[in-house]
Image: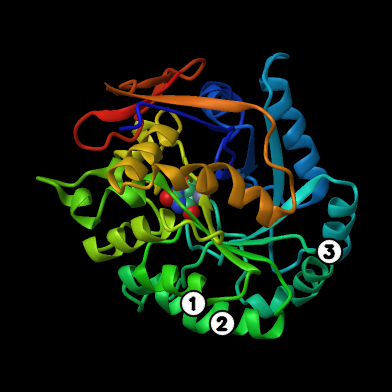
């Protein structure tokens, strides 16, 4: 039985770091585990131009210490009015690694997102020509569509026409939550990939209502039925190069989670990689872990895997209970799967 695992240092292809005090307090957890991360642009106000992304990158780099070997890979948030030329310059100047499409009002801080994908055709053409990935929050926002069906309906009504019109466009369908999304990506061309979060591999929708309402288990896309969780575990551990790691670690203060209208987001940065390792172990697929965590992502993005390595070992431990945010007197609760975690960072 494998007790220690040394792999190429992983990257996180979907991460929320926020800004200011929260950034300072959550960043070290990602730096310990990942060489690079795709940084989500849904700040308030959002990161909309490459100039915004450049300034945000400076703030992240300022929060790193000199010895940290961590590269934030920046994105911008598409609006109906994004200027394709601004995106092109951002890519050519090596400020932007990807561009994010939030359907307007799909999730946290997405009010300025895209109301109709046809409004951003000009940007999609630039991305296709530059081979720069479009990252998609794949949920429709129509309130008449059941929240548990919004990913599937998005694939049918929005993703499929985007792919038909831009067959050469690289797309990451982010944080997939359904059997349908996993099957769609498996059968699609190699231009289409998906990230899978640790929490969607561990919880199903019952966890949100386990003995009462559990706001810290609420994220978007919302966790689905057990059969979907099992399909995601099969996809992640399949060795298929279209699936890779993206934690979607999304810190919100306890106050903003536990309120009349609690925010969507699960903060898993303090134990994300360890949970993934445990899932791969439970699925007898530790031999495929490095591909999912460290190889498939850079290959898709046309980047080299990291040179450093990282070691995990088998040991039971409990993650930190509360993360106190210095300077604002509030705390964030990290994601806690039931029971102990079986893998630990060396
Ligand atoms: O649960 C989520 N939280 N889903 C998202 O898409 C956004 C994220 C956040 O920013 O908090
Ligand atoms: Zn996210």
Mark 3 is surrounded, within 10 Å at the Cα level, by few (under 14), some (14 to 19) or many (20 or more) other residues, namely: some
**Residue 108 appears in the figure:** no
CA separation, marks 2 and 3?
A: 21 Å
The numbered mark, 2 or 3, whose residue comes first in the sequence reads 3
Image-based side of 257 in relation to 37, left or right: left
Quadrant housing residue 215: top left
Residue 327: % across, % down: 52, 15
130 and 327: which is toward the camera: 130
Mark 2 is surrounded, within 10 Å at the Cα level, by few (under 14), some (14 to 19) or many (20 or more) other residues, namely: few
The numbered mark, 1 or 2, whose residue comes first in the sequence reads 1
Quarter holding the C terminus is top left
Q: Do callouts 1 and 3 mark residues in contact (Cβ within 8 Å)?
A: no
Image-based side of 4 in relation to 70, left or right: left
Q: Do callouts 1 and 2 mark residues in contact (Cβ within 8 Å)?
A: yes
CA separation, marks 1 and 3?
A: 24 Å
Q: Which mark is residue 130?
A: 3
> Which residue is the site of mark 2?
160
| Residue at the image position 53 percent from the left and 62 percent from the top | 137
- Where disc 3 sits, the SS reads helix
CA separation, marks 1 and 2?
A: 6 Å
> Which residue is the site of mark 1?
155
72 and 36: which is toward the camera: 36
Quadrant housing residue 335: top left
**Residue 211 appears in the figure:** yes
Residue 37: % across, % down: 62, 39
104 and 203: which is toward the camera: 203
Vertical comparison of 111 with 80: above or below:
above
- Where disc 1 sits, the SS reads helix
Quadrant housing residue 223: bottom left
Image-based side of 83 in relation to 148, left or right: right
How many marks on residues? 3
């Amino acid at each position: 039985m494998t007790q220690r695992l040394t792999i190429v240092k992983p990257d996180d292809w979907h991460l929320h770091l926020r800004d200011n005090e929260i950034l300072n307090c959550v960043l070290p957890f990602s730096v310990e585990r990942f060489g690079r991360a795709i940084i989500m642009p849904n700040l308030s106000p959002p990161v909309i131009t490459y100039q915004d992304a450049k300034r945000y990158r400076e703030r992240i780099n300022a929060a790193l210490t000199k010895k940290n070997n961590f590269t934030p890979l920046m994105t911008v948030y598409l609006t109906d009015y994004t200027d394709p030329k601004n995106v092109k310059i951002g890519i050519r100047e090596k400020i932007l690694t990807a561009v994010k499409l939030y359907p307007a009002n799909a999730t946290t801080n997405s009010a300025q997102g895209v109301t109709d994908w046809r409004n951003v055709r000009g940007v999609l053409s630039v991305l296709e020509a530059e081979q720069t990935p479009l990252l998609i929050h794949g949920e429709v926002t129509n309130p008449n569509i059941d929240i548990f069906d919004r990913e599937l309906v998005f694939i049918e009504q929005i993703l499929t026409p985007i792919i038909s019109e831009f067959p050469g466009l690289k797309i990451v369908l982010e944080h997939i939550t359904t059997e349908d999304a996993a099957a769609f990506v498996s059968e699609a061309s190699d231009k289409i990939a998906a990230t899978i979060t640790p929490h969607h591999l561990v919880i199903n929708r019952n966890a949100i209502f386990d003995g009462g309402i559990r706001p810290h288990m609420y994220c978007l896309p919302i966790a689905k039925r057990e059969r979907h969780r099992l399909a995601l575990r099969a996809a992640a551990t399949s060795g298929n190069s279209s699936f890779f790691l993206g934690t979607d670690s999304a810190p919100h203060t306890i106050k903003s989670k536990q309120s009349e209208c609690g925010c969507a987001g699960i903060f898993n940065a303090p134990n994300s990689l360890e949970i993934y390792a445990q899932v791969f172990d439970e699925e007898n697929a530790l031999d495929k872990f490095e591909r999912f965590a460290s190889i498939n992502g850079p290959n898709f993005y046309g980047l080299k895997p990291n040179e450093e390595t990282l070691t995990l070992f088998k040991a039971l431990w409990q993650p930190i209970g509360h993360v106190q945010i210095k300077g604002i007197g509030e705390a964030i609760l990290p994601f806690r799967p039931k029971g102990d975690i079986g893998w630990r960072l060396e």
